[in-house]
Amino acid sequence: MDNHPISCYHLGQYFQLDGKQLQEQCKEHISEYGDWDQKPHASDWMLFAKNVSTRLSIDETALSNGELYTIVTNKEAKGRKGAIVAMIKGSVAEDIITVLKKIPERSRKRV
């Protein structure tokens, strides 16, 4: 199953369960999404300071409905776990700087 990810919804259907309810249970109870410390601001920005390395990249991408996001990634992770350092809505430099300054200065200076 690790090689072929499927949604909880489809997994539920496979086992003849209510896939929608299984997906909801996973989100609200198993995943600890409700206790996520970034939940209040996740629609505007997310920051994973522990993923900072000496080599970072920054790019902007349009996700859905033309929403533009700036994404900072750890190049050493090569797209795997720990690759995302920050995801910030928009591309206004001041907004991006404000979020990135939340990374401890010692980590920022390693880049």
Image: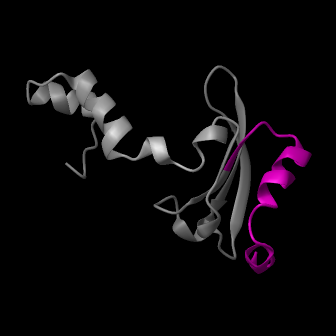
Determine the residue positioned at 73% across, 76% down.
107
Residue found farthest to the right: 94
The answer to which image quadrant residue 111 occupies is bottom right
Q: Position of residue 63 (x, y in %)?
A: 62, 31
Q: Is residue 70 left or right of residue 39?
A: right
Residue found farthest to the left: 16
Determine the residue positioned at 61% across, 59% down.
48
* Range shown magenta: 87-111
Determine the residue positioned at 12% across, 29% down.
14
Q: Position of residue 54 (x, y in %)?
A: 69, 76
Residue 25 visible, this angle: yes
34 magenta-colored = no
Note whether 6 is above or below 93 in the view shown. Answer: above
Q: How many marks?
A: 0
- Judging depth in this view, the residue of 38 and 5 nearest the camera is 38
Q: Is residue 14 left or right of residue 105?
A: left
Q: Position of residue 79 (x, y in %)?
A: 51, 58
The answer to which image quadrant residue 56 occupies is bottom right
Determine the residue positioned at 64% across, 35% down.
43
